[in-house]
Image: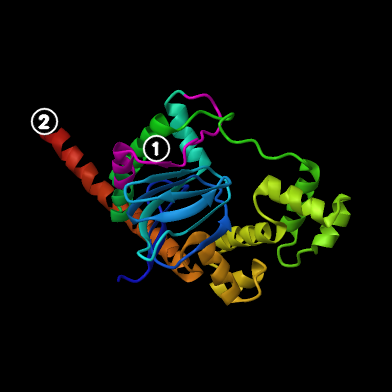
Amino acid sequence: MAAEKARYWQHAAVPGVDLLRARFLTHRYSRHAHETFTLGLIEAGVEEFEYGGSLLRAGRGAVALLNPEIVHTGQAAGPAGWTYRVLYPAVDVVSAVAAELGWPPGTPSFPETVVYDERSARLLLAAHVAAERGDRLASSSLLTTALSGLLRGHARPGPKGLPPPARRAPGAVAAVRDLLSERLTDPPRLHDLALATGMSPFALLRAFRDETGLPPHAYLNQLRVRLARQLLDGGVAPALVAAEAGFADQAHLTRHFKRVVGVPPGAYQRERRNGAHGAARMARRNVQERPGLARLAFGRDGSG
């Protein structure tokens, strides 16, 4: 049986789009949410995941369409594991394609999470394979084609499309979210948060979970992972990232990072660097080729 393997990288031609290709056997994603859309194609096996209060399964050929900021999990539905490809396009990337389709302003959404649609699967696969090969023109073109096809086939326009959050205590929850964002390395106790909001610990815990989909401690770890990604993108060493993002040590960072992103921090950062170096090489090549192209053009004009 093949071992687990995962690669997570940035799209070389379209800013705001990340990609994942992975085979997982025992890996389990913890409850988390993405700021981006999550568009996945199951190539083999079956993935099982909680999403929007339901337990869903996606088998071979299924396309999974997850909206931004919706808490979900992910694990194998059986011992054979699952293999899949995922696109993570930012909200503004998807909204821009929707605008080109003539849709009204707002964030589109996908009301059905798991679909079996051969055309959508082919579009997603073509866009992902082109990005994996590093073909900038083909990958950017096929990404736009895939997003427009998925939107036309399975989405609905925003902003009414996104499910409204629970609003039991929006002011208190917003205050707690702000406090946690400000104190990643020294978070307050639940009792302190309750005092700050004038609620009982139990009531605050229930309201916070209802609105965000996570208890405060899990939400805090999600914020830490997002900060860790930003620091890793900036070239900060993983050992330093752990401390700056509020993790106890590098092992603590690695454990939570992989549960959300799917790869360890070091592998994530290496792919970021490789992508940046590839873009720099492409830019240098373009600069070097321009004079030759100008001379060819001049020669054609002069020979007329």
| Type of the residue with mark 1 | Leu
Q: Secondary structure at mark 2?
A: loop
Decide: is 208 above or below 120: below
Residue sitting nearer the eye, 250 or 47: 47
Task: Choose top left, top right, bottom left or bottom right for residue 81.
Answer: bottom left
Q: Which residue is mark 1?
A: 147
Tell me the quadrant of the picture where the N terminus can be found.
bottom left
Give the residues drawn in magenta, as a range: 103-125
Task: Please report the residue visible at 52 percent of the width from the left and 46 percent of the height from the top.
Answer: 36
Q: How many marks?
A: 2
Q: Horizontal placement of 140 versus 184: left or right?
A: left
Say which amino acid is labelled 2: Gly
Q: Position of residue 166 (x, y in %)?
A: 70, 40
User: What is the x, y in percent for residue 246?
Assistant: 67, 68
Left/right of residue 219 with respect to residue 77 in the rendered view: right
- Closer to the N terminus: mark 2 or mark 1? 1
For the point 32% across and 43% down, the residue is 121
Position of 251 compared to 6: left or right? Answer: right
The residue tagged 2 is 304
| Crowd class of label 1 (few under 14; some 14 to 19; many from 20; radius 10 Å) | many
Q: Is residue 106 above or below residue 181?
A: above
| Distance from Cα at disc 2 to Cα at disc 1 | 45 Å
Q: Residue at x 51, y 33 (%)?
A: 108
Q: Nearer the viewer, residue 150 or 272?
A: 150
Neighbour tally class for label 2: few under 14, some 14-19, many 20 plus, Cα within 10 Å = few
> Do the residues bearing badges 2 and 1 touch, measured as CB atoms within 8 Å?
no
